[in-house]
Amino acid sequence: MKRNTWQREAVRTALSDTIGFVSVQGLHGRLHATGSPIGLATVYRALADLAGEGEADCLQSPDGESLYRACSTTDHHHHLICRHCGLTVEIEADAVETWAKNVAAEHGFTQAAHVVDVFGLCAACTAASATATP
């Protein structure tokens, strides 16, 4: 476990105050907007550390950029993510866990790990798009 510096705590707090996923640059910009002198490289390191310790979720955007979000649980879980508003719901997926374990074993793999994120439209964005369409 890393030492808890003011920079790390600032990143942790800013991330927990953010709804949905945010890029490193986006979070760095928010910190600077509040007057923080924290450097971009420090934000990168702090987010990577938080993700490694299970305090933050990390996923890749469609263009390959790492996006982060404060994690409400350190247990293994998956996400439903709205492509429009970014609403994120943490879910358990026992069927996915079983499938991943079985397919790995069928191919002789052990200690398999996986990441599953499901992207779609949340109920509110679906309703809004239905009313916006003539």
Image (tube, rainbow, N blue to C red):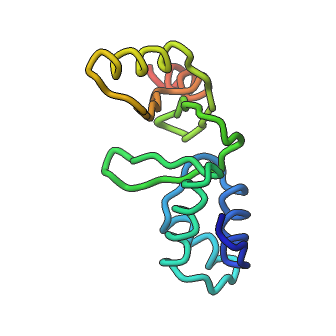
For residue 94, side relative to residue 18 (left or right): left
Residue nearest the viewer, comparing 22 with 68: 68
Q: Residue at x 62, y 31 (%)?
A: 89
Task: Specify the farthest residue to the bottom.
Answer: 37
Q: Check the image and name the residue furthest to the left.
A: 107
> Where is residue 53 shown, x and y percent of the image?
61, 54
Foreground pick, 66 / 122:
66
Left or right relative to 18: residue 112: left
**Foreground residue among 95 and 26:** 95
Q: In the rendering, at what x and y percent does residue 38 appear?
A: 61, 82
Q: 92 above or below 66?
A: above
- Residue occupying image coordinates x 48% and y 15%: 98
Task: Check the picture and name the quadrant holding the N terminus.
Answer: bottom right
Name the spot of residue 113 as percent of width and height, x first: 43, 34
Quarter of the image holding residue 90?
top right
Specify the quadrant of the image occupied by residue 27: bottom right
| Count of numbered badges drawn on the protein | 0
Q: Give the residue drawn at x 58%, y 68%.
A: 46
Is residue 33 or residue 5 the one in the foreground?
A: 5
Q: Quadrant of the C terminus?
A: top left
| Image height of 11 relative to 33, above or below | above
**Residue 83, image x, y percentages:** 46, 36
